[in-house]
Image (cartoon, rainbow, N blue to C red):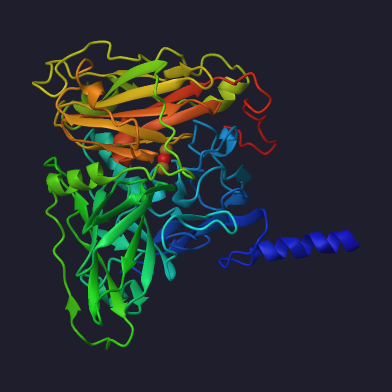
Amino acid sequence: MVSWVRVILVLMACFTLPSIVECRTRHYKFNVVLRNKTRLCHTKPIVTVNGKFPGPTLYAREGDNVVVKVTNHVQYNVTIHWHGIRQLRTGWYDGPAYITQCPIQTGQSYVYNFTITGQRGTLLWHAHILWLRATVHGAIVILPKLNVPYPFPKPDKEVVVILGEWWNSDVEAVINTAMQAGLAPNVSDAHTINGYPGPLSNCSTEGGFTIQVESGKTYMLRIINAALNEELFFKIAGHSLTVVEVDAVYTKPFKTNTVLITPGQTTNVLLTADQGSGKYLLASSPFMDTPVPVDNATGTAILHYTGTLATSATTFTNPPPVNATPVATSFTVGLRSLNSKAFPANVPLTVDHSLFFTVGMGVNPCSTCTNGSRVVSSVNNISFVMPRTALLQAHYFKISGVFTEDFPGNPLNPFNYTGTPPTNLQTMNGTRLYRLSYNSSVQVVLQDTSVIAPENHPIHLHGFNFFAVGRGLGNFNQSTDPANFNLVDPIERNTIGVPKGGWTAIRFRADNPGVWFLHCHLEVHTTWGLKMAFVVDNGKGPNESLIPPPSDLPVC
Ligand code: C2O
């Protein structure tokens, strides 16, 4: 009896959030429910977690065990992905539907249970099925271990800033209509900051998000791009920002006026309130350097100095033009790993698997589509077909017929990737995986193609961080480009923008057994097939195997 009471008390202490109390296991309950869009001029219901948009912030410390019971109360199948959490040996809890688990069906629950190892900073969680992550997303804040300081002066306050999109229509209807026609889907109707389109939107009566600051103090903004389909610029009138961390990895402090952040990326910046007083605009606007439709609305919020009258004028800022490639490039190439003694950049210096993946578009026949064809996406000209059984289960239980292991490490039909496209734009379909032996070092050159049009692709790898060792425009040249790779302090992250008409080279060590998804984090491209997966073997050592699946793992 006594010990039972004690257990309850410990659990209650762990629930005292968001003030971080010291306990090793943090319990969360996520109820996936419908909530009316009361904030945004529309009252149609959206899918949310615990009724919130954005969803609740998950707070933890490095080393903590996080347990989240997700219960599905909506009509859709649901999964939750803990984007950027390494999930060492715990792939069952990674979350992408049909990759690591079957979805949680209506009325069912699944308990995600993972330990945060060797990571600290900001990440995000989001639904990983259909287009539900449009509204089902939230922040993950990982504080350093107790008594371990940040490698920069401690900010006076921290603020989570989630950049998102607002859709007046049901997002599932948007993508279904597009898939039937074989054409591009509609774009969102507004950009949001912490759920609000802001004072400059045509929904300004809903107010907006305000950060209250005191002159002279320093703030850390934990910025997250939770949008479906748009890379974003973020800036604040009259203030510069210092990047100190991306994707839960510390960086060398990097001062900038404008942050570029792709869907799936996170960026911590320090902001010094160095003006005496006033109100300053925060702006979130799209970056798209290919002439395709974008949601051009700027999401806004206000930096409000204490003591400034609410009625006083706001200092505005002009966001960069939508196609401001130079602004995007100078941000991307300015980032470096901190690479300190405590936080070294362990870049693989040798390469066991040297892979070359083209990422881009294709056109496949479709008799029922508007133009008799449909737009598709692919990796190495293979449009990935989602299986009906989760790949990780098929791998673990050796179920045959779900996937093959013949994903090509190089294009099967090489062409001038960034030159005149070939006449045949058709892709192959397949559920093909690429097999990696445990602890092998992997280099992947991600090469954009000019099929239909060259375009920037934010590529995300599950289960690993990688180092972005090189980048260039045009076609990657295997004999000359590697000489310019940065193997000392390249940025380490989980999502990277491949430049339009160019390439990015990444390296990682395959030290996490399981099945790991790689895909474009523009949801429309994922839907169209720009995705593949790695299968990583178990190692031979005691802690080098995938753990067995939990008993409540959902069934398909
Ligand atoms: Cu944030 Cu596979 O996604």
Whether residue 366 is visible: no
Query: From the viewer's perspective, is 302 left or right of 425?
Result: right
**Residue at left 56%, top 50%?**
62
Taking the image as shown, residue 321 lies to the left or right of residue 257, namely left
Q: Quadrant of the N terminus?
A: bottom right
Q: Is residue 105 left or right of residue 528?
A: right
Residue 332 horizontal/vertical position (percent): 24, 44
Q: Position of residue 15 (x, y in %)?
A: 65, 64
Please tell me which residue is depicted at 23% across the width and 42% down the height of the picture: 333
Give the quarter the ligand 1 occupies. Answer: top left
Q: Nearer the viewer, residue 524 or 405?
A: 405
From the viewer's perspective, is residue 448 above or below residue 186? above
Q: Using the image, determine if residue 440 lies above or below residue 300.
A: above
Q: Is 155 above or below relative to 110?
A: below
The residue at the point 19 percent across, 19 percent down is 480
Number of marks in the image?
Answer: 0
Q: Nearer the viewer, residue 211 or 362?
A: 211
Furthest residue to the front?
341
Q: Nearer the viewer, residue 226 or 537?
A: 537
Q: Position of residue 126 (x, y in %)?
A: 45, 48
Which residue occupies the foreground of this view, 449 or 337? 337
Q: Quadrant of residue 39?
A: bottom left
- Asked which quadrant contains residue 60, the reply is bottom right
Apparent side of residue 274 relative to residue 395 in the rendered image (left or right): left
Residue furthest to the left: 420
Hey, which quadrant is residue 157 in on the image?
bottom left
| Above-or-below relation of 363 to 26 | above
Question: What is the x, y in percent for residue 80?
Answer: 51, 45
Quadrant of the drawing holding the C terminus: top right
Residue 436 visible in the shown view: yes
